[in-house]
Amino acid sequence: MAESFSNAQTGNKPADPYTQKNLDSTSLKEKVEDLLQFIDKTKFCMLTTQTADSDLLASRCMALAAKEGNGFDLLFHTNTESGKTDDLATHSSVNIAFVTPSGEWASISGHASIETDREVVRKHYSPALKAWIGDLGDGTHDGGPEDPRIGIIRVKASTAQYAVSRKGVVGSFVELAKGVASGESPAVNKLRHISEEEVKQWKAQ
């Protein structure tokens, strides 16, 4: 069992009052629907992989292409010849992080696979990929749906945690200002966790 880190002794008072005050318990349906709505609204995320040849991590900005598996299969376009596919072929564990300028965020952990089946690629193809993939002028590698360089990264989510605002931007600033003045942690976010068991339960519906 991994040891936990602690650098404080606070007696019977919570050492992390922000987390305690903002933890939000609600139904699985509401947790999942709010998360999926947040993902759709944010769209852009950072995909973190372990590099193929070391224990270091690398993050890349990705745009969500589609959701499947009742929302917990997240699909992204990729150039199969890029470094991230080497990473994923070696280490399938990934994290996806969404964040907004107002401080709302979502962190999703799971496992990724690379799909090159043309039917899957054609289903999710976007003409905008031509700008990213490029046309090599050989009639095959043209950035179109049949270009073998275009693949799909499918992330099957295992767990998720996220924070969405309770009060909106203005209300959050007011709460933060009160917290600065009083020393009391503000209740500004709904901090939620979706466990591996809950993900399986939702996908099985």
Image: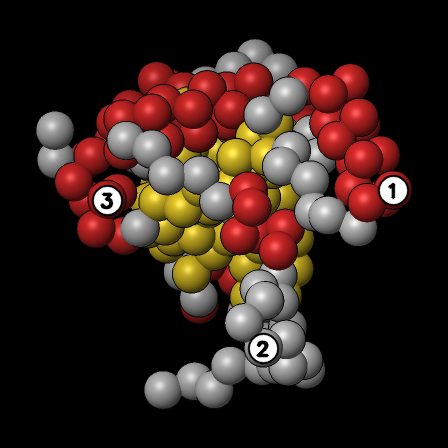
Near-viewer residue (168 or 138) = 168
Judge from the rendering whether residue 57 lies leftward or rightward of residue 197; answer left or right. Answer: right
Please tell me in which quadrant of the rendered image residue 188 appears. Answer: top right
Residue 102 visible in the displayed image: no
Chain-order first, disc 2 or disc 3:
2
Which amino acid is tagged 3? Glu
Give the residue at mark 3. 198
Give the residue at mark 1. 181
Which amino acid is tagged 2? Gly
Q: Circles 3 and 1: CB distance less than 8 Å?
A: no
Question: Horizontal and vertical percent for residue 96?
Answer: 53, 45
Task: Tell me which residue sits at (54%, 72%) in the image.
Answer: 12
Give the residue at mark 2. 11
Q: Circles 2 and 3: CB distance less than 8 Å?
A: no
Q: Is residue 71 above or below residue 17?
A: above
Question: Horizontal and vertical percent for residue 105?
Answer: 60, 37
Label 2 – label 3 distance at C-alpha: 33 Å
Near-viewer residue (116 or 71) = 71
Question: Horizontal and vertical percent for residue 183?
Answer: 79, 50
Near-viewer residue (73 or 133) = 73
Mark number for residue 45?
A: none
Chain-order first, disc 2 or disc 1:
2
Q: Secondary structure beneath disc 3?
A: helix
Task: Tell me which residue sits at (71%, 35%) in the image.
Answer: 103
